[in-house]
Amino acid sequence: MTASRFCALLGAMAMSTASVAWAAPAAPPREKRAAGPGAAGEAAPGPRDRASPGVDATMPPREGSTPKEMTPRGRNKSLSHRLQVSVDLSLALGAAFRVTYSDTVWCGQGDPLSENDTFCVGLAPPALDIGIGFGVLDALELLAEFRVGMMNDTLGNRPLVLMPGLRIWIDPTLPFKIGLALQLVLDFTRQDSATQQGHLPEKGTKLDLGVRFFVQVQYDFLRYVGIFARMGLLGTFQKWVGVNLEGSLGVQTRFP
C-alpha cells in the first residue's frame, strides 16, 4: 500500500512539471542585424553618420578637403595687365650704326677736317629707360618711354629721346608672356659737341624722327611685379640714317 501511494505521488509530480513547461511561452528569436549598409529595413549611413568623433558634421568641409580646382582660392588668378598702370625701369645697351646724307657731315669717326667717314659704327651709350603704360585690354597696352643717356654717344652728345607707342601681349593672362611693341621716336638730342661744329647735318638743331620696335620677354611673379628682357631696333632718318641694335633688362611694377 505504501509503495503504490509513493508511485502515484511521483506520477502526479511529473505530470505537474510537464504541464508548467508546456504552458510557458517560448522566447522570441533574436533578430540578426544587417551585415552592412543596404540591407533590407536599414538605411545607408549618411555623411553625418560617418562623421568622426569631435567633428561637427553640420559645418561645410574645409578647403583642403576638396579638390584644389574646385575651391575658389585654388583657381589660377589672371595676370593680365588690363586696367592697370605700369611703370617700367630698364637699362639699355647696344651697337650704333650711322650713315650720313652728305660727306661733309661728321658721323662720329675719322677726322672731319681731312677724312670724314660717311658710315660709322660704335657702341650705343648705356641709357636709362623710364616707361609708363596703361592696359586698355588684356593683350593691348598704351606705352610711353623716356630715355636718358648715361654717357655721351660717339658724337659727344647725351641722348634724350621720347618714345610713345603700343605694346601687344601674347598669352597676357599667364605669368610668362611675350610682348611686341612699336613706338614713335622723338629724338631731342642736341647736336652741339665741339667736334661737330661746322660739320652738322642740315637739320642738326631740329627734332629727329624715327621708329622703334622691340620684343619683350616678361615673367610676372605677382599681379603687381614682373621682370623683363628686351631686344629691338631703333632707327632715325631726319638728320641721317641711324640704327641702334639694342638689348635691355628691367623691372616692372603695376597698380592697382
Image: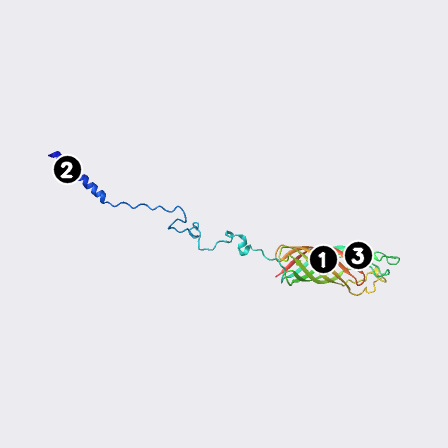
Q: Quadrant of the C terminus?
A: bottom right
Residue 155 sits in quarter:
bottom right
Q: Quadrant of the N terminus?
A: top left
Residue 150 sits in quarter:
bottom right
Q: Which residue is mark 1?
A: 214
Q: Which residue is mark 3?
A: 97
Residue 175 sits in quarter:
bottom right
Q: Residues within 10 Å of mark 2 (few under 14, many from 20)?
A: few
- The residue closer to the viewer here, 13 or 189, is 13
Question: Residue 178's spot in the image, x, y percent?
Answer: 67, 56
Question: Residue 140's spot in the image, x, y percent?
Answer: 66, 61
- Give the Cα separation between the discs numbered 2 and 1: 129 Å
- Give the Cα separation between the discs numbered 3 and 1: 17 Å
Q: Give the residue at x 80% y 54%.
A: 122
Which numbered disc, 3 or 1, marks the residue closer to the eye? 1
Q: Amino acid at mark 2?
A: Ala
